[in-house]
Amino acid sequence: MYSGTSGTCGNYSLVPLPNKRARSGFDPMSLQQIVRIQTKRVALEFEVDAKSRLVQRAFGGQENDPSTVIAIPASGDGWVFEPALRAVHADGNTSTDLIVDAMSQQSDLTRIDLRDPEYPLFVQLFIRAIFDLDTFEIWTVIHHEEESEVVLEAFASSSLDFGTGEFWLTQFSGDWADEANMISERLSPGTKSLDSKLGVRAHQFTAPWFLVSQGAAPSEDEGVVFGGSLAWAGSFRFSFEVLPNRRLRTVCGMNPNASAYRLAPGVSFETPKMVWACSDRGTGDLSRLLHRYVREEVLRDGDRPRSILLNNWEATYFTFDEDKIVSLFAEAKELGIELFLLDDGWFGSKYPRNDDSQGLGDWKPDLAKLPHGLSALTDEAERLGLQFGIWFEPEMVNPRSELFEKHPDWLIRQPKREMELQRNQMVLDLTNPEVCAYAYGILDQTLRANPGITYVKWDCNRYFTQPGSSYLRPEHQSHLQIEYVRGLYEVMGRLALEHPGVQVMMCSGGGGRVDYGSMRFAHELWPSDMTDPARRIFIQWGFSHFFPALAMANHVTRSGERSLKFAFDVAMSGRMGLDIDLANLSVCERQFAARAIAAYRQIREIVQFGGLFRLESPYGGPRSSLMYCYGAAAVVFAYALEDSRANSLALKGLDRERLYQAKEINGECGMEGTLSGAHLCEHGLPMRALGRFESAVILLTAQ
Ligand code: GLA
C-alpha cells in the first residue's frame, strides 16, 4: 500500500526545476517526470504529461496503479465531473486549461506553478508535507493579469484522486447539543457532498472533517484510512465522486455556493489549507498523527498543560452579582481549581444582559451586577491565586442594544426583508473593516483595562440566514461568506498577536466552530453545550478523531443528574473543568470533588500529552473505554452505558516487556495489581462489573 522511502533524497525525490516561466521555447519533455512528495509512510505523486498538464497518481497507495488523472480539473474544456476550478475570463470564456510552468521545492514545501496557455491566469498549487506525521497541507493561490475581473465560480483547495476500489466515508454530523455523531457509508457511483452554507457558526450541522477508508468502514487498528479537514471557519464543501471508471476523486474547499468571486487583475486569491493525513493502521494511528499535528502545527501553546477551570454558566446562567462570583472564587481555590471563567451576563447598562434578549454588543460591565467593574473580580482572583477569564461574543449584536442603536447598518442582513433573529441576535458585518476594528477594539480595551484577564471564551451563537452586506458593493455581495471569515481571522489574529498571554477557548454555542483554521488562534474548544456525561461520551468520542484531549474542554455539570463520579470521570478524559454551583455541594460532594480534582492533577499530563488509544466504542456499548499512554504511565477510562459485566479490557500502546502497577483512582472500590504489558494487551485488565452510568479510572505505572 505504502510507498517506501527508498530512492528518495531526504523527504523528496529530486525534481529538476525548469528555468523558464514562459511557454514559448519551453520543452515539455523536460517536465515529463514524476514529482514525488514523500512522508514517512505515504507518497503523493504528480507527473507532468506530454501536454504539460499536471496529472496525479493515486494518493497514499496503489503504488502499482500507473494510471494518472488530471490533478486540478478545471471546468469548460473537457472535464465533465466536479471541477476544482471554474473561472469566467474577462472576455466571457468559461473554460480554463492549466499547464505546468514551473516547480520548486523548499524544505517541506512543494510549489507547482500552472497557467492557462491562452490567458494570463495563474494557479500556484502548494503542498506542505509534514514528514513524521504523514500529513499534507494543500492549498492554491490564484491570480491573473487579464484586462478586467475574472469571476471564480469554483476554487477548491485540494482535488485528490484515490484510485479505484471500494471507499467508505465517515462524517461527523448533528446539531446544537448533539455534535459529531459518526456515520459511515459506502460510497457508490455519483457524488456525495458534505457541506455547510451557514457562513458563520458554519459547523453546527456538519464538522469540517471526515474519514475516507478503503475496503470497509474504518476500524481502529487496521486498514487504510485518510482524515481530511479544511482549515476554514466558514462554509465548506467536500465532494466525493465515484467516477464511471470507479476512481474516487475528492474535491474539497470553501463552498462556492452563492460565492462567485470577482477577482481583480493583480490580486491574489488564496484558498484555505486542506489537511490530509493518512495511516495504514486504522483510525487509532490516524488520530494520534492528527493529535500531534494539532498540538504542533495548529493550537497556540500546544505543549503547555491546560488549567482546571470553573465556569459559572450552568451554575448561575445570567443571575449573579459580584458577591456570588467572589464567593465562588474562594470555594474554587479550596477545591484546587486554577482558573475561573465568568460567562455571559456581565455587561450592558442601558440594556443589561439579564437574559439573551438584549445587551449583546455593549461590552461594558453591568454595574448593577458588578458595581466595582471587572477589576474588583480580577483583583480578588489574583489575591487568591486564581487565573481569571471572561466570555465574549464579539461578532454579534442584539437589536436591543446601544450598539445597534448607533450602528443599525453594521449587520449582515438583506435589505427589504424582515430581520430574521436567532437567539434574539444578528451577526455583525465583519466584511467591513470598521466593524472589525470595533470588534477587536472591545476585546483590546477590556483586556488592557483589566490585565488580570488571562483567558477569553469566544462564542458565536447564530449563523447567516440573510447573507447581505451594506458594506460590500452590489456586485460583490457574493464575496460575503469569504470576506467575513477573512475579517474574522484578522480580529482573531490581532488578539493572538497583541495579547499573547491571553488564552482563548473557541466556542460556538458548543461545537459550531471546530476547524483547524480558527483553532490556530485558540488553545482549546468547547465541543458541545451537551454536558450530560451519558451523551457527552459520544460527542467526545467523535471529536477525539481530530482533536487531542488537551484541546477539548469538558465540564462536570449536573446535566442528566448523573452521579458526580460519572460526571468527573467523563470530564477527566479531556481538559477538565467544572460548571456547577460549588455552594450547593454537600460536604460529601465537596470532599469528592476535591479528591477528583487532585486525581486529575495526577493524570493531567498523561491525558493532555499522551497518545490516545480508543478501546471500546460507545456506539457498540454497553461499555465504552479509552486510554492514554505517556512515557512510563497510562490511564484507562471505562464508562458503562448499560450494565456491564466484569469483562477484562484489552489495553493498547503499552510496553509489552514492562510490568505495570494498576490502581483505580477517583473511586472507593479501588482495584490494584501488577501485570505485564504483554498480559494487559493480550488478556486484558481485569475490570469490575459496572452498573449503568458507572465508571472507572485506572492509573498504570510502569515499574
Ligand atoms: C453558548 C455557549 C454556552 C454559554 C452561552 C452563554 O450557548 O455554548 O457555553 O456560554 O452561550 O450565553
Image (cartoon, helix red, strand yellow):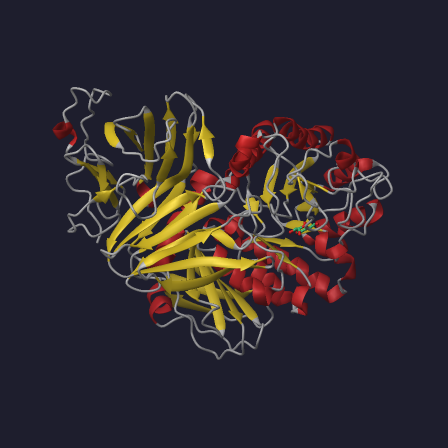
Residue 77 image offset from top left, x and y in percent: 27, 38
Please state if 543 lies on the left or on the right of 650 as rendered.
Answer: right
Observer able to see residue 139: no
Q: Quadrant of residue 176?
A: bottom right
Eyeballing the image, is 238 above or below 427? below
Residue 177 image offset from top left, x and y in percent: 60, 59
Eyeballing the image, is 499 above or below 370? above
What residue occupies the far front of the structure in this picture?
A: 92
Name the quadrant of the N terminus.
Answer: bottom left
Is 614 or 244 nearer to us in this picture? Answer: 244
Give me the residue at 65% from left, 69% from top: 563
Name the quadrant of the C terminus.
Answer: bottom left
Residue 16 image offset from top left, x and y in percent: 18, 27
Q: In which quarter of the image is residue 673?
A: bottom left
Observer able to see residue 690: yes
Give me the residue at 71% from left, 49% from top: 333
Is 295 or 77 nearer to us in this picture? Answer: 77
Please state if 269 lies on the left or on the right of 441 as rendered.
Answer: left
Residue 677 image offset from top left, x and y in percent: 36, 63
What residue occupies the far left of the structure in this picture?
A: 29
Please state if 521 lies on the left or on the right of 20 as rendered.
Answer: right
How many labels sit on residues? 0
Is 675 or 68 nearer to us in this picture? Answer: 68
